[in-house]
Image (cartoon, rainbow, N blue to C red):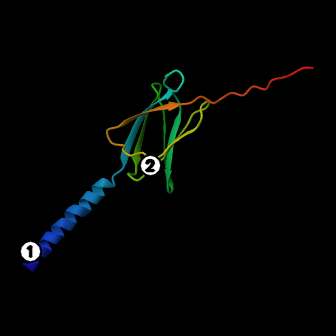
Amino acid sequence: MKQLLLIGGMIFFSVWSNAQLFNNQPSVMRGVLVDKTNNLKLEAAFITFDFGTHTVVAMTDSEGSFILTNIPKNVVTVKIVMPGYEDKVITNIQSLEDVEYHIAMEPKKVLTQLNYSK
């Protein structure tokens, strides 16, 4: 009986540890960036995230699409930077698998200085 419990415990631990290794495999994040005001797709935006000593960076293509690969499962924050647009930080990403994110970027507000002549 003890041998049976020992063997069962070893099998359980083996299956559990393999499941943990599988769950910690890197993910892929896919998405499309658009201008919030006119829905045009945005080319050449940078999408980044840092974890420890490693940074993953992608750039949107001519269709506004991007793919980030080798993202650890525990990363939940992504930063998007595009000239002429407000930087965007997305937090609490719940899922990366089988999801394509559609992200709207807001154009930067242009302040003009008024020149009042007297």
Which residue is at 53% across, 33% downward? Answer: 45
Q: Is residue 80 above or below residue 3?
A: above
Q: Quadrant of residue 111?
A: top right
Residue linked to disc 2: 76
Amino acid at circle 1: Leu
Residue under label 1, please give it.
4
Q: For this rendering, which residue is in front, 97 or 57?
A: 97
Position of residue 31 measured from the top left corner of the image (x, y, whole percent):
42, 34
Residue pushed farthest bottom? Answer: 2
In space, the residues marked 1 and 2 are separated at their CA atoms by 42 Å
Q: Residue at x 10, y 79 (%)?
A: 2
Q: Earlier in the sequence, mark 1 or mark 2?
A: 1
**Percent position of residue 117, x then y:** 90, 20
In the rendered view, tell whether residue 56 sits above or below residue 38. below
Could you tell me which secondary element the residue under label 2 belongs to? loop
How would you rate the neighbour count of disc 2 (Cα within 10 Å): few for under 14, some for 14-19, many for 20 or more?
some
Judged left or right of residue 96, residue 60 is right
Q: Position of residue 53 (x, y in %)?
A: 51, 56
The circle drawn on residue 27 is: none
Residue 43 horizontal/vertical position (percent) = 51, 27
Q: Residues within 10 Å of mark 1 (few under 14, many from 20)?
A: few
Position above or below: 108 against 93: above
Q: Left of 83 or right of it: where is 118?
A: right
Q: Secondary structure at mark 1?
A: helix
**Residue type highlighted by circle 2:** Val
Q: Pointers 1 and 2 in contact (CB under 8 A)? A: no
Question: Looking at the image, which residue is at 75% across and 25% down?
Answer: 112
Q: Quadrant of the C terminus?
A: top right
Q: Residue furthest right?
A: 118
User: Toward the viewer: 38 or 58?
Assistant: 38
The reply, left or right, for residue 19 in relation to residue 53 is left
- Quadrant of the image containing the N terminus: bottom left
